[in-house]
Amino acid sequence: MPEISASQVQSLRSRTDLPLMDCKKALIDAGGNEERAIEILREKFKDRMSSRADKEAANGRIGLYADANGGALAEVRCETDFVAGNKVFVELANQCARQVAETHLKDPQALLASKASFAAGRTLKELMADAYGKLNEKLEIRRARCVHGAAAGYVHHNGKVAALITMDKPNDAAGRQISMHIASAHVLLGLDRSAIDPKLVEEAKAAARAEVSNKPPQIIDKIVAGKMDKWFGERVLLEQPFALDDKKSVGEFAKESGVSITGYLRYELGGKD
């Protein structure tokens, strides 16, 4: 059995953040070779990760990545709310989102098998195994989507709601503020009026007309038009009162900021695409 010094164990622990005894045993099995010990730990905790497959990953957070070329959101799950707030898990969720943005993959299994350019070509599955070794909970990617174009985003402090927008030109500050609005929106059916399902529009128009059926015929159309303006204003992103300054619409704020919003994405933990 090779002699393993305390400094060797501490060095491996500083690189992996795993328990001292696990690090020492891995070094012994690796004959004192630190790189081989890391591989042993990876395999060991990957196996333990698989053994928790029957556990429910009921908590988690939304990972975010955005840059001048695009961005992504990824819903990554864990077992407890405590781990969901751990910095290791937060970093993992954001790494998953970055991999989605860079590969345009959204299938969880394909993502896990893909190699990350920002992690020396290691697969996302390996990164998740590393995180499991530190967190000891079941981890999984539940869903993911990417967007194309100059992107900016925002994740709520609890990680359970996040939003991402694309613009015709980069503007991180304005993009983040608009994303904050989207994250806080209770109702949001589309970017503009053309994005809303025509069936919903016709139903709303019919309901508005029914409400004023007792009014003089010559003013009904005008009243209905006013009601529909209000209806759209509550549901269309560009027309909604801006959450950070309700004296202007989101569209007006974007224009003042010198950008046009070309798309958006909103994720809430437990939601569906």
Image (cartoon, rainbow, N blue to C red):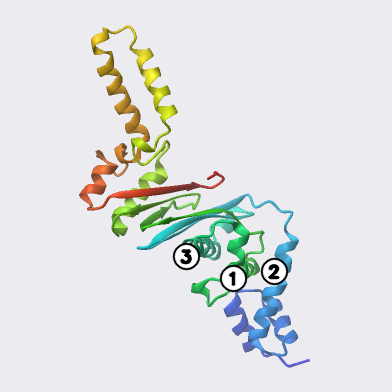
The x and y percentages for residue 9 are 65, 84
Q: Name the residue under label 3.
A: 102
Q: Which of 145 and 182 is in front in this view?
A: 145
Residue 168 placement: quadrant: bottom left
The x and y percentages for residue 26 are 71, 81
Q: What residue type is labelled 3?
A: Glu
Number of the label disc, if any, that sits on residue 123: 1
Apparent side of residue 203 relative to residue 176 in the rendered image (left or right): right
- Residue drawn 27% across the image and 43% down it: 251
For mark 3, give the secondary structure.
helix
Q: Nearer the viewer, residue 154 or 273?
A: 273
Q: Are marks 1 and 3 in contact (CB under 8 Å)?
A: no
Q: Dot 1 surroundings within 10 Å: few (below 14), some, or many (20 or more)? A: some
Q: How many labels does the image show?
A: 3
Q: How far apart are marks 1 and 3 (CA)?
A: 13 Å
For mark 1, give the secondary structure.
loop
Vertical order, 173 against 254 (above or below): below
